[in-house]
Amino acid sequence: MAAGGGSPSIVEFFGGEDGYRCGYCRSDTGNISHGMWAHSMTVQDYQDLIDRGWRRSGKYVYKPIMNQTCCPQYTIRCQALHFQASKSHKKVLKKMLKFISKGDVSKVASEEEPMDSHIEDVATCDFAYKSESRVSQSDLTPLAVDQAERVENEDEDSGETKEEGNVQKVESDSVQICADKDTPVPAEPSHSAKAVHAPPKPGKGADLSKPPCRKAKDIRKERKLQKLLQNQMGTAEGSQLQGDQTFLLQNSKSKTNQPKNIEDFVFVPLPDDARHKLEVRVVRSSPPSSQFKATFQESYQVYKRYQMVIHKDPPDKPSINQFTRFLCDSPLEAEHAPNGPECGYGSFHQQYWLDGKIIAVGVIDILPYCVSSVYLYYDPDFSFLSLGVYSALREIAFTRQLCVKAPDLCFYYMGFYIHSCPKMRYKGQYRPSDLLCPETYVWTPIEQCLPLLEHSKYSRFNQDGKAVDEGRLKELGRVRVLHKRTVMPYSVYKKRRKGPSDEASVQQYASLVGQTCSERMLLFRS
């Protein structure tokens, strides 16, 4: 799907010269990143941004300055359709199954992975507040699209430039408009959908730019997974993904030598006398749905206990205000597409209900090509269930389920992989997975990245020395700006602007978000 049909993304860029405290190595000023406040954002823009190393914390969107920050953070994604659970993953799934069916509370924590699988986002919380926007909503509401002036040496007219050639009235509430459900939007190519590899030199092995040869057994397994998922209920707003729902495991026991997949552990019929009942409910958090509002207080109390017990926060720190801004507020517009998931795209809370009470919540974004994990918090009384690992496995299963209706949505993004911080390396155990090259923004299998990271904490993964960032800024004049409630290209704004030039700041912003996003998103200028 492409961005379109709804209101455009509107952002304020803050630069990134100041250093902040690092949550990994505890350096007071070593955490260096660029940041911007997103007043609104389309899911396609955010997808394209995270495919350039950005990530959100509430409405604050940041990008580590990789060759300067103390602990480089590499975007990591798991290929959900091909995911194979490790022995330790299966132990966690079996432990939950035993607990639900028999009440077994075997307190053997996973040795290989920490309990909290989304710990890094705590580190981003402080600078999100320091950089909060002070701009009023009225200043962010575009009045009209300005008469665009042709940019010199323009190779071709884009549809967007022609549209800007006519003055168009924009409704005063346009910032709030969501995509029209009935209007299909053309697919937009994105490098996020595929990994790019340099062709090998003769005699240096297989060409990774071509699809790998696949065994018939793997193809059969994938077909079985597709059939398996098609039998599962759709995940509409507030739907329940029940741990005890009847699920057709087609021929799952016919071949004992085939490894079990996640669904074999999660969607199995439980005995009638099962001790517990586990339900997973997906509720939209932004804009908040009725189900989200009805469970807000209970969810907040779980978060508060989690922060105090697991992260040792004082009782007054995990306030409702912090909870709302950090884990409930989101710049993402709710969007629906004919070929998209039933629940739509945007920001959600995946609530884990045990016997009628919330024991954990996974904060997730559903984007055109992925489910992106934002944060997890849980009731510390249930730490023995390894909920960090369990929730990550459930989110992978959820991604596979969404992929049935939305075939492009086949990746699970786990946030950042931080090799220089040993306790954060566990994310690399969700295989197969890829890391994002910090210079060319192509995906590289993690097996190829680890030797480089052992040698240096900052590394370019793309080994083709001539490769460049294909999405790099090429025409500064085409960057879209929102100035005095009027949308215009930077080439027009630059002539109208009074006072000192801000070209260096705009150049930096556009270089970081890339040409495509810089032409779609609106950069607020006061």
Image (spheres, helix red, strand yellow):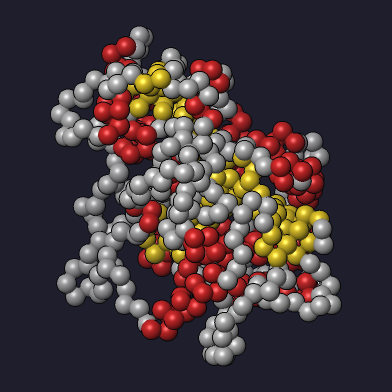
Q: What is the count of numbered marks?
A: 0
Q: In this view, does 188 lie to the left or right of 253?
A: left
Q: In this view, does 185 lie to the left or right of 119?
A: left
Residue most toward the top? 498
* Quadrant position of residue 463: bottom left
Res. 308 in view:
no
Q: Is residue 411 left or right of residue 464?
A: right
Front residue of 43 and 198? 43
* Quadrant position of residue 478: top left
Q: Which residue is at a point 56% across and 57% down the rendered structure image?
A: 424
Q: Position of residue 55 (x, y in %)?
A: 50, 44
Residue most toward the front? 182
* Quadrant position of residue 22: top right
Quadrant where the C terminus is found in the figure: top left
Front residue of 31 and 119? 119
Front residue of 101 and 203? 101
Res. 484 in view:
yes
Q: Which residue is at a point 84% across and 72% down the rendered structure image?
A: 275
Q: Position of residue 148 (x, y in %)?
A: 27, 21
Q: Which residue is at a point 72% across and 33% down the rendered structure image?
A: 321
Q: In this view, does 252 lie to the left or right of 495?
A: right
Q: Which residue is at a point 28% across and 13% down the rendered structure image?
A: 495
Q: Where is residue 2 in the image (x, y as percent from the top left)?
A: 39, 44
Q: Position of residue 163 (x, y in %)?
A: 30, 28
